[in-house]
Amino acid sequence: MRLEDTAIPDVKIVYLDAHADPRGLFSELWDATKFENIGIHENWVLDGLSRQTRKGTVRALHFQTPPRAQAKLVRVSRGQALDVAVDLRQGSPSFGRHVAIDLNEAEWKLLYIPTGFAHGFCALEDGTELTYKLSAPYSPDCNHLGLLWNDPDLGIGWPVDEASAILAERDKTFPRLKDLPPVFGRDGGAP
């Protein structure tokens, strides 16, 4: 297992070891000790799965606010997706910047996203599935905000245009970054 920094140092790519033989392969998706040894110290409390029926499905840009803010560990278990994290931490040197990483089932990599980030993705193949580890349970009281997925100020190179994107109505109505009130402090907690 190895860790790679992204353009935003707090967001990490984790490369897993996969052991193959004629029967197939085996990989440890989570080992608390190994992850702590590479610097990821989260208490994961929830596993989730998101399946997209059609290519071009966009789920973005979501976050939960403190005190139920969520760190995420994301992997594509089937298909391929462009996975995006946007820094919403007030006072962060990378505030408003994003990381966009291609995740696919063939590569044994995960994206670690700490608290303080909006998260979203676009399915690049029909039937794409993403699995998540989350550091806080779902909380309807803390999950009322999001960020407009195609805010031009973010400059995200989504692989689908607005007319072709398959989105939830809610995702079309989120505010742009410039209209979003402060939601996270520098440490990913309350501002």
Image (cartoon, helix red, strand yellow):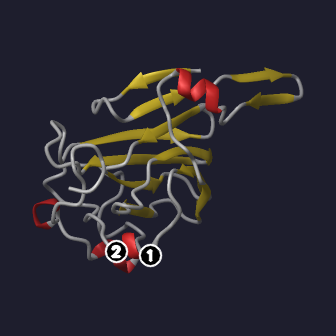
Q: Which amino acid is tagged 1?
A: Pro
Q: Position of residue 115 (x, y in %)?
A: 37, 48
The answer to whether any part of residue 118 appears in the image is yes
Q: For the point 49% across and 51% down, which residue is it?
A: 124
- Front one among 163 and 178: 178
In the picture of the structure, the residue carrying the numbered disc 1 is 140
The answer to whether any part of residue 143 appears in the image is no
- Front one among 21 and 48: 48
Q: Residues within 10 Å of mark 1 (few under 14, many from 20)?
A: few
Q: For the point 61% across and 24% down, which residue is it?
A: 34
In this rendering, position of residue 150 left or right of residue 18: left
* Viewport quadrant of the C terminus: bottom left
Q: For the point 26% across and 76% down, which residue is it?
A: 173
In this rendering, position of residue 143 left or right of residue 80: left
* Viewport quadrant of the N terminus: top right
- Image quarter for residue 19? top right
In the picture of the structure, the residue carrying the numbered disc 2 is 144
Q: Secondary structure at mark 1?
A: helix
Q: Residues within 10 Å of mark 2 (few under 14, many from 20)?
A: few
Q: Position of residue 20 (x, y in %)?
A: 78, 22
